[in-house]
């Protein structure tokens, strides 16, 4: 698969501050990459290096093989960028604004007209094309900014917090729009909204203290973060000690934690098993049946993206404090 973006051992210093530390990353064509990290992680600096606004202190970045500094003008023609607050002229009509932005990309005549119409169709702006931008909702203004970023049909699209400030319906529409735009181009989605990244992106990169702390699909990251297999079981067992004692007798069970109890006798427990153990759910259900404990819930428990994110950020902070 063709590589659109390549970062090779990129470092960036601001005086004594080491903002980016050995960032190496390849983004293939058609991939939606989610870039996560706390404030100060290096996300903004990374985006500025990718777009050619900042030169790396060491290493190099390239778009379709073109160095972002040595070939800055050519590289910028290959990037579409939508910042968190889209830079719109609110007094202009949508179509006039897009024609103006197309002219900045040196699009003229029929080429410009076709580019504007294509962007309007892609971003579902046909009914708003003649409206004044300042009269549009936040969701529509985001679409106008996205359309402007797509006018020159770039192979790489960078979206910075594209759903910030949108209501749930607008978030769902924007998420679908992003997925529909994927395929012909690569995307980098910078966001603090973990569920949106999880639902929208093919791949997730977590930055902390200038380094990549995790890189992979959501499924792979969470599978690796779960550690020992864990299973949640809820049954009506009158005696908590008997419940715990019965569960711990299941082969390969390592730890049983009672995480909630109800006055009626319903108890929820989290049972950890050794790695490589066979699926214990039939045996857990058998324990309850043998003791005549009604079973309400039994499922595998996996780590969430939020848990993984917090764990990695705290580990990075701890390493920094120790250093």
Image (cartoon, rainbow, N blue to C red):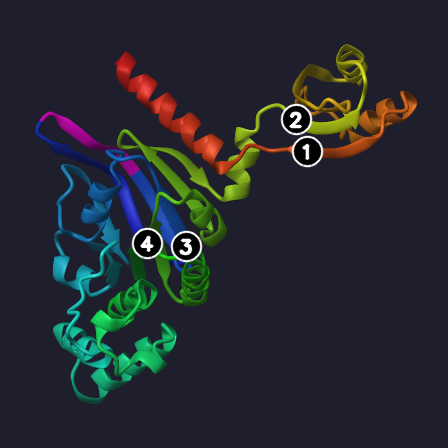
Give the alpha-carbon distance from disc 2 to disc 4, as whole Å.
Answer: 36 Å
Q: Which residue is mark 1?
A: 300
- The part of the image, by quadrant, that contains residue 212 is top left
Residue 160 image offset from top left, x and y in percent = 29, 52
Give the alpha-carbon distance from disc 3 to disc 1, as whole Å.
Answer: 28 Å
Mark number, residue 230: 2
Q: What kind of element bears circle 4?
A: loop
Q: Which residues are magenta?
A: 16-23
Residue 112 image offset from top left, x and y in percent = 21, 82
Tell me which numbered mark, 2 or 4, is placed earlier along the sequence: 4
Q: Which residue is mark 4?
A: 165
Q: Among all residues in the image, which is located at the extreme bottom?
A: 110
- The part of the image, by quadrant, that contains residue 321 is top left
Give the quadrant of the N terminus: bottom left
Q: What kind of element bears circle 1?
A: strand
Tell me which numbered mark, 3 or 1, is placed earlier along the sequence: 3
Q: Is residue 27 left or right of residue 235?
A: left
Q: Is residue 213 magenta?
A: no
Tell me which numbered mark, 1 or 4, is placed earlier along the sequence: 4
Q: Which residue is mark 3?
A: 32
The residue nearer to you, when weighing 215 against 61, is 215
Badge 4: residue crowd in 10 Å (few <14, some 14–19, many ≥20): few
Badge 1: residue crowd in 10 Å (few <14, some 14–19, many ≥20): some
The residue nearer to you, when weighing 216 against 135, is 135
């Amino acid at each position: 698969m063709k590589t659109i973006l390549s970062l090779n051992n990129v470092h960036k210093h601001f005086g004594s501050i080491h903002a980016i530390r050995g960032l190496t990353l390849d983004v293939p064509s058609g991939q939606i990459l989610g870039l996560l990290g706390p404030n100060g992680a290096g996300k903004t600096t990374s985006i500025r290096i990718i777009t050619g606004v900042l030169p790396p202190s060491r290493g190099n970045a390239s778009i379709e093989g073109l160095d972002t500094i040595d070939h800055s003008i050519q590289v910028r023609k290959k990037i579409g960028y939508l910042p968190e607050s889209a830079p719109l002229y609110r007094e202009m009509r949508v179509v006039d604004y897009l024609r103006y932005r197309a002219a900045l990309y040196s699009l003229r005549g029929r080429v410009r007209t076709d580019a504007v119409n294509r962007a309007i169709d892609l971003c579902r702006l046909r009914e708003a094309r003649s409206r004044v931008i300042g009269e549009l909702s936040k969701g529509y203004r985001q679409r106008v900014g996205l359309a402007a970023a797509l006018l020159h049909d770039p192979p790489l699209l960078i979206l910075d917090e594209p759903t910030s400030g949108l209501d749930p319906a607008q978030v769902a529409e924007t998420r679908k729009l992003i997925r529909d735009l994927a395929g012909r181009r690569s995307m980098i989605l910078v966001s603090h909204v973990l569920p949106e990244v999880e639902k929208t992106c093919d791949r997730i990169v977590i930055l902390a203290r200038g380094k990549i702390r995790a890189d992979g699909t959501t499924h792979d990251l969470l599978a690796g973060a779960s550690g020992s297999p864990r299973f949640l079981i809820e049954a009506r067992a009158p005696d908590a000690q008997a419940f715990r004692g019965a569960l711990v007798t299941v082969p390969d069970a390592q730890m049983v934690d009672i995480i909630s109890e109800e006055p009626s006798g319903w108890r929820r427990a989290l049972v950890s098993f050794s790695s490589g153990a066979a699926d214990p759910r039939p045996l857990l259900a058998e324990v309850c049946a043998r003791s005549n404990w009604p079973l309400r819930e039994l499922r595998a428990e996996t780590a969430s993206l939020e848990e993984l994110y917090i764990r990695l950020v705290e580990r990075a902070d701890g390493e920094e404090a120790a250093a």
